[in-house]
Image (cartoon, helix red, strand yellow):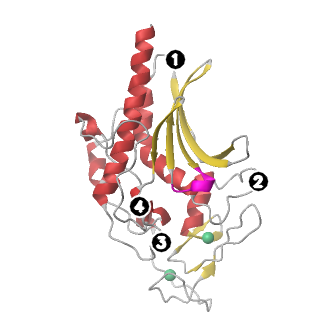
Amino acid sequence: MAVPGGLSRASLGVAERLPVADHEENRHMGTPERPTAAAGGGPRRLPMSQLFRRNRPEEGDQAPPPTLVASTGIVCTLAGCSNDTARPCAYRDGRGRACGAVYCPEHGVSTDGKFYCRRHAGVLRAVGAQETPQGGLPDVDNRAPSLVSWIARDLDANVRRLLSGAARPGESVIADETVHVARDFSRKARWEQSWRLVDHTGQILKVTIQVFEENDSLVRVHVGSGVIADAVPPWIVHRTEDSDVATDTAHRQRFYLWLDESIFMAVDRFRTERQRLN
Ligand SMILES: [Zn+2]
Ligand SMILES: [Zn+2]
């Protein structure tokens, strides 16, 4: 995956582009509140800001070329689409409930021989299509896994770089490939994805993105034993609105910049403290 040491210059142009309505979480970007910081301040202009660029594959670019699809007699439910080639989403959650969404091939996703709405294709990607988590797939209306996955993919390159930068000889960085569920004492579920700095004796530092099932819009970031960020992403603040609103690139970038910097400062504190102790 990402090589520590930064992104290539060629990738920077891509980073500024936004996918157009290609992702459930991305479709309803409104005018967000500034993310609230759990510890110390919002976005800040640091020189290192220059290093933080988003670089992710654009799923929207992978739309299949138009092919002739036989009519199913069912009209796609996406607003503005009149294709009568729609099929139901094949998603079934751990309680056996079906999704109910009906989309044409253009507005759904085919994967592993099955057809899903984009949202549930995202959930399967988040939890890993190969293995079904204990208790079955997440509830049909649960956005937590895909939100964790979305944020983790965006932070991945920087978190790997920061942890690699803090590593000593013999230590390495291990990253979760997918989102997984964890439960607290009262069986409350949360979805998580982590990066770990490890050596042969075990874990040294862990960075975790976490979203609780009962509040699936709040993103929490842990570094070590501390919560360093608690925020509702700007594109979710207004996601209850029905219509797509203008994409606010500046707010989105500021949100990620703030997360990147919060993680940077926490990892840097860890590194400084460690040096002091030796
Ligand atoms: Zn359609
Ligand atoms: Zn679905």
Q: Which mark is residue 135?
A: 2
- Calculate the distance from the C-alpha at mark 4 to the C-alpha at mark 3: 26 Å
> Mark 3 or mark 1, which is nearer the start of the sequence?
3
Between disc 4 and disc 2, the foreground one is 4
Q: Which residue is mark 4?
A: 235
Residue extending furthest toward the bottom: 73
Q: Position of residue 181 (x, y in %)?
A: 66, 47
> Mark 2 or mark 3, which is nearer the start of the sequence?
3
| 34 horizontally vs 189: left or right | left
> Which amino acid lies under the numbered mark 1 shown in the image of this protein?
Gly
Residue found 31% across the figure and 48% down from its top: 11
Residue found 38% across the figure and 25% down from its top: 268
Q: Which residue is mark 3?
A: 64
Q: Which residues are magenta?
A: 212-217
Secondary element at tag 1? loop
Q: Which mark is residue 170?
A: 1
Check disc 1: other Cα within 10 Å, few if <14, some if 14-19, many if 20+: few
* Nearer to me, 55 or 32: 32
> Which amino acid lies under the numbered mark 2 shown in the image of this protein?
Gly
> Which amino acid lies under the numbered mark 3 shown in the image of this protein?
Pro
Residue found 65% across the figure and 69% down from its top: 114
Task: Check mark 4 vs ligand 2: CB closer than 8 Å? yes or no.
Answer: no
Check disc 3: other Cα within 10 Å, few if <14, some if 14-19, many if 20+: few
> Which amino acid lies under the numbered mark 4 shown in the image of this protein?
Trp
| 115 horizontally vs 3: left or right | right
- Calculate the distance from the C-alpha at mark 1 to the C-alpha at mark 3: 45 Å
Secondary element at tag 3? loop
